[in-house]
Amino acid sequence: MEEPEPASDEDVPAQDQDPNVTNALMHLCMLVIMQDTSRIELYASPLMHYLAVRGVDEHSKTFRAAFFYTPILAAALWINRLIMLEVAVPLEEWPGVGLRGKAMLVSVPERIHELRRKHLCEGSFSPTASILSQLAMGKHFNQLHQSPPNIRWSEDEQIIYYEGEPVELGKIKKMCRTLMQELQEALGELTFGSVPGIDLGAIIDSMAWSQAFRRESYSFIKHVKNQERTDVGYGYLYRRARKGKGGWKLFRKSRAGPIEWVDGQVKKYLGAERRFLRKLMVCMHVTGKWAVITCQVKLTTVIDRQQVASQPVDPNWDRSRSATAYIPPGTYTSSMDACVF
């Protein structure tokens, strides 16, 4: 029997999460946003202290310009208003923090205006009032001075600043190398273990084979002189999957005799495939290098996304003339020969 996959955090319903932690976080938000600042210094407020720290550029060790600091203030203001709306008229009551639900309020408008005047208006003794004052001053400075470019280089050309945030080219290079390594490992996992490498120098990628080139769906991997190196696909992967290579056990003999899919392993395989494709899209977008991954093997998954649980696996597959004769119709393919180099 296959053990079920452990549920991820995204699959856990909200009602099953720890209510004590949720109430504690809500209470903390209320204390910070609804703090009375009439008898304390401005930056004694935890929220204003945090925003003051955000006002320092950690790379240049200077204060951020108004163009780059006002978006931070605006984001904090938006969050404050959103939390205060939940405090004022929650859809359900919060007994742990003493908030009544919307249905229990005598007057919703009065409740909203009461909290707005006390905690969200300019002139009130609250962190939000200080944010509004600083935001108004920042907008005034933005109107007096010319806006800097959104993108600029550092003097040593090793950092790109995008909207004031630094992007180090060295980190991008490291990320790309790590991503390529993860893709190589994931590709080996999806092809059921290591596969023979392909000498790219021996691949013929020429338009001289004009008659075949004009055919619809032509690909260089179909060139007759490339068949020895690129003739892989359903049949190749199916045989490897049947042997259980790479730690996968996608098939088993049923009690009735025929071979059937192992549902737990199939779902796990499809999950690994989705993660691979997402990383591949990121890699192609960031590096633009399709061939590094795609020329090494033609990756063609043999599992149908929708019919995998219902379609049997024919035990006579090895004696079939066609590699795809016993694969369920509509089988999903992520073949790499569709890429354009």
Image: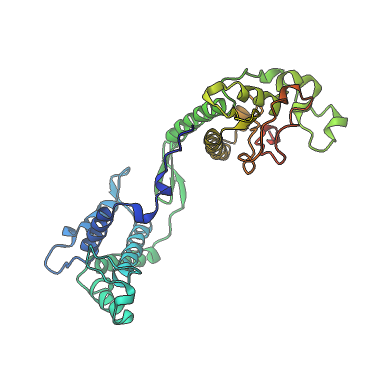
| Direction front: furthest residue | 256
Q: What colouring does the structure picture have?
A: rainbow
Residue in view at x 63 percent, y 44 percent: 306
Residue 318 vs residue 144: left or right? Answer: right
Judged from this view, the residue extending furthest toward the right is 211
Question: Which residue appears farthest toward the left when viewing the image?
Answer: 39
- Disc tally is 0
- Quarter of the image for residue 192 reads top right
Image height of 85 relative to 335, above or below: below
How far across and down, in percent of the image, does residue 153 sit?
Answer: 45, 42
**Quarter of the image with the C terminus in it:** top right
At a point 66% along the width and 35% down the height, the residue shown is 312
**Which of the 4 image quarters holds residue 235?**
top right
Q: Nearer the viewer, residue 48 or 243?
A: 243
- Identify whether 337 is placed above or below 62: above
In the drawing, does residue 148 fall left or right of residue 101?
A: right
Question: Can you give x and y, in whole percent of width and height, for residue 320 in the image?
Answer: 77, 25
Task: Say which residue appears at 29% left-offset and 72% top-offset.
Answer: 88
254 relative position to 181: left or right = right
Q: Residue at x 43, y 51 (%)?
A: 163
Reply above or below: 13 against 61: below
Residue 87: give x, y in percent of width and height: 29, 68
Q: Is residue 233 visible?
A: no
Percent from the top left, x then y, of residue 326?
73, 32
Is residue 218 visible in this depiction of the protein? yes
- Residue 71, image quadrant: bottom left
